[in-house]
Image (cartoon, rainbow, N blue to C red):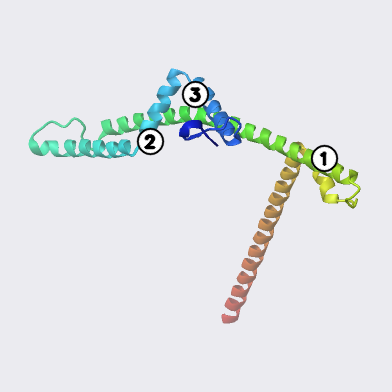
Amino acid sequence: MRIGQGGRGAEPDPIDPINQNIDAVVAMHNIAEQQVDNHQRTVESLTAWLGRPQFFYGILVGVSLWMLANSLAPLFGRHTRDDPPFFWLQGAVGLGALLMTTVILITQNRQGKLAERREQLDLQMSLLTEQRTAKIIDLLEELRRDMPSVHNRVDLEAEALTKTVDPHEVLAALETRFEEKDETAAAAQIVTAEIDAAATETQGGVSEAKREKAE
């Protein structure tokens, strides 16, 4: 941040990394919003309106009034439009639930695509950061070896960090670890089942012995 001339207050610094990151995020959001057509925007506006507490209270009030009016209409000599168990109301509720589910799925579909793009961007930035970090460590190690005033020694940890990590190897290692965990859990379940079966058989034998002794 910098102070403007004439005491006009603080003005954003164009080279401030915080402002640059904010501008980048805003630009990405604007580009994503510009790609939304009018139909999608209408559906998402409807989804936002359906998610408000006022809509929930409106449903409760509307359903209660409909049931109360049709239940009390015969007492005042009026014709009921929907006798209990309120088939018209059930049909309207079912149709409304179908429409709301479709609207929410349409909204979640676009949000899921945006979330997937952000995850891919985060993964790419993480890989790039890892590569830059490895390069910095490599340059520091090279500088340390070239400086005569610094004692030259072998740093195995630094050498390991200078190598970039292959995402495919990491994914394969994770899958192998999960498979081993699943196999261990399955084996533990089998052992537990065998122990329970043996305990049940032993208990049955003890009960049989007691019954024979009693006889």
Callouts 1 and 3 close, C-beta under 8 Å: no
Q: Which of marks 3 and 2 is in front?
A: 3
Q: In which quarter of the image is residue 119?
A: top right
Left or right: 121 in relation to 32: right
Residue 211 screen position, x and y as percent: 57, 76
Q: Position of residue 190 (x, y in %)?
A: 68, 57
Q: Sequence order check: which comes first, mark 1 or mark 3? A: 3
Q: Of callouts 3 and 2, which one flags the residue occurring earlier in the amino acid sequence? A: 3
**What number is the disc on residue 139?**
1
Viewer-nearest residue: 116 or 178:
116
Q: Position of residue 113 (x, y in %)?
A: 56, 28
Q: Give amino acid for label 3.
A: Glu
Q: Compared to 118, does 180 lie above or below?
A: below
Q: Which residue is drawn at 10% across and 32% down?
A: 78
Q: Which residue lies furthest to the front in this view?
A: 6
Q: In the rendered view, does 188 fall on the left or right side of 71?
A: right
| Classed neighbour count for the residue bearing mark 1: other residues with Cα under 10 Å, few (<14), some (14–19), many (≥20) | few
What residue is disc 2 on?
51
- Is tag 2's residue or tag 1's residue first in the polypeptide sequence? 2
Residue type (three-letter) at the residue carrying disc 2: Gly
- Contact between labelled residues 2 and 3, with CB atoms less than 8 Å apart: no
Residue type indicated by callout 1: Leu
- Quadrant assignment for the N terminus: top right
Residue occupied by mark 3: 33
Total number of numbered discs in the rendering: 3
The residue drawn where x is 43% and y is 18% is: 38
Q: Distance between the residues labelled 2 and 1?
A: 54 Å
- Residue at the bottom extreme of this rendering: 214
Q: What element carries label 1?
A: helix
Q: Which of marks 1 and 3 is in front?
A: 1
- Work out how far the residue at label 3 is from the one at label 2, CA to CA, in angstroms: 20 Å
